[in-house]
Image (cartoon, rainbow, N blue to C red):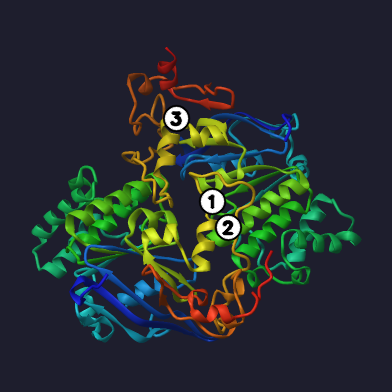
Amino acid sequence: MNLTKEDKILEVKNLCTSFFTDEGEVKAVDGVDLSIEKGKTLGIVGESGSGKSITSLSILRLLQEPAGRIKEGEVIFKGEDLVKKTKKQMREIRGNNISMIFQEPMTSLNPTLTCGEQIAESIRIHQKLNKKKAWAKAVDMLKLVGIPSPEKRAKQYPFELSGGMRQRVMIAISLACNPELLIADEPTTALDVTIQAQILELIKNLQKELGTSLMIITHDLGVVAEMCDKVAVMYCGKVVEYADVKTIFTNPKHPYTIGLLNSVPKHDEDVEGDLSIIPGSVPNPFHLPEGCRFAPRCPHAKEICLTKLPHLEETFDGDKVRCWIHSEEWEKQGKAVNAHE
Amino acid sequence: MSNQALLEVKELKQYFPIKGGVFGRTVNHVKAVDDISFTVNEGETVSIVGESGCGKSTTGRAILRLDNPYSGNVLFEGEDLISLSKAQMRKKRKDLQIIFQDPYASLNPRQTVSQILEEAMEIQSVVPRKDRRKKIQELLETVGIGAHQMDRYPHEFSGGQRQRIGIARALSVNPKLIVCDEAVSALDVSIQAQVLNLLKDLQRQFKLTYLFISHDLGVVRHISDRIIVMYLGKIVEIADKKALFDDPKHPYTQALLSAIPSTNIAEKKERIILKGDVPSPIDPPVGCRFHTRCPYAFERCAVEEPKLMNVGNGGFQQVACHLMDEQAK
């Protein structure tokens, strides 16, 4: 797959974001490279603290400054580096070219404004429409996201709507200015499964209709399988595997990806006996392991893993993996060091 | 597993009053749980699944009388828990323990782990004072926490470890039944798998009976023997694990199962997408409560409430749906 620059809507290069606290520096995102092709969907998966949400907040420059700061790297959106933009320029991009859907539809909507006003607000600001036209567009948007009797709902406040409805309003706001890229941070995590199915279906259909590129951040591997074209698996601030969705689920190569897939209890498959697990827990972000960050929990880890950080290397089938197993050095290494049962 | 019933829930109702008006009179009720009955046998894991607001957690709390039920009976080893006095119920909780969802909120931040575990033993006076420290060590090792950490405070532990402490606290009084209320929902998948395996181990080791409350059907499939599906305060289906997952009968169960995004990319299934939201439990729909969203609903569903009836061929499966009647005709 040789892609020219024009095919990529977003390219993140060596992004490093850190938080500076009294106890020291936390490297929340540490050298992340990603790209999203036009009209395609990229999924970022990982557990709490893997840096997936901070990656998305860094892209939109929504970090809590000065504690959180982008230290290094570029975020190229349509040929321009967002890291170098001024605050004012970013405001013009947010909600207009790139918008975001957050996890908690209750806390991310303004409780003192009606749903219609919240949608119309961004239309007025970015598209310079007058109040009346913006309102009409807001009602249209509510209709588009499948809210019954949109004229009535537009005049209601968020507390009057159910969780699923609120998330639809969020989607309406984010799509109101027809952005080229939509970032969805755990868009369905707070919702029940039957409502989640509705929302995922809606996002998929709207993406097809509007041609929006999509970045989904989630911890739910099912959502990834359902929605994404490409997947980046993150662990402790680094991308450990980056591949097609099919490869991730049928031929995963990083021991963490494999462990993660095996530890999910499946609803459509019987597992005899115990679930396979990943031993131990995520390392303390203030004292990250020196070599591969997964080495202390990895069943295959050898000497080299504890001392040297592997690079994200392309394997034979185009899958990118950050693991020594797939390097030439591996054969020269001695025995595995972690004696897990 | 035996066929001896340990817990029998009969016609349990939990209505929460809504106060209103100048005099704070009860103007209406939230019918969180509305007339449900089921049995849990000794050594069995029975799960209750359903979406938010279906009454699954309320059921768990009502059984332990953390909230006193509105009406109905809860028989534990044949004894009615509802008729016990508060003091008697407190003693009885030696046999019935609960593990909560949020390991952060359910441990006292001002107590060390050993104090947390000792308090339970003291209230139930299960272990003589001089042996308690030893017992605490054993308990912590059982749940996979080093005994040297017994004098630490909850904030020094990770989420998974805190949930293990919650489990150790439940075990400290040698209970017979443990209600696990979304016990693994707050954990990351890799940690969730560890805790699920631990729960299974403990069940074998101590012959425990679990009432497992969860919204995650993957977890439920892994841990349960029997599954209760609830919708808006009612049981819509009860079945053995195999029957429920291989041949779900109630349209709601079918929709619920098909709604879960699958990691199996090779087999893309046709999805049943339910329309609309769950109605309010203050004024639930008349007739079958699911009829407003059911793709197969017909006139009878809006008038008459379906009763749970046996449909299992061989295995255990009960469904509350008028379609079963129609098919039988």
SS class, disc 2:
helix
Structural crowding at the residue carrying mark 2, measured as other residues with C-alpha within 10 Å and reported as few (<14), some (14–19) or many (≥20)? many
The residue shown at (76%, 62%) is: B140
Task: Identify the chain of the residue marked 2, using the numbered disc in the image.
Answer: B
SS class, disc 3:
loop
Task: List the residue tagged with mark 1.
Answer: A265
Q: Are marks 3 and 2 in contact (CB under 8 Å)?
A: no
Residue type at mark 1 is Pro
Residue type at mark 2 is Gln
Task: List the residue tagged with mark 3.
Answer: B250
Task: Identify the chain of the residue marked 3, using the numbered disc in the image.
Answer: B
A339 displayed left or right of A93: right
Residue A104 visible in the shown view? no
Residue type at mark 3 is His
Q: Are marks 1 and 2 in contact (CB under 8 Å)?
A: yes
**How far from the left and from the top, in percent, is residue A192?**
42, 48
Q: Is the residue at mark 3 from the same chain as the one at mark 1?
A: no
**How far from the left and from the top, in percent, is residue A313?**
41, 77
Task: Identify the chain of the residue marked 1, using the numbered disc in the image.
Answer: A
SS class, disc 1:
loop
Q: Quadrant of residue B113?
A: bottom right
Structural crowding at the residue carrying mark 3, measured as other residues with C-alpha within 10 Å and reported as few (<14), some (14–19) or many (≥20)? many
Above or below, comparing residue A215 to residue A309 in the picture: above
Q: Nearer the viewer, residue B287 or A77?
A: A77
The residue shown at (41%, 19%) is: B304
Label number found at residue B310 = none
Residue B293 visible in the shown view? yes
The quarter of the image holding the N terminus of chain B is top right
Above or below, comparing residue A333 to residue B149 in the picture: below
Give the mark, 3 or 2, whose residue is nearer the N terminus: 2
Task: List the residue tagged with mark 2.
Answer: B192
**How far from the left and from the top, in percent, is residue B108?**
67, 63
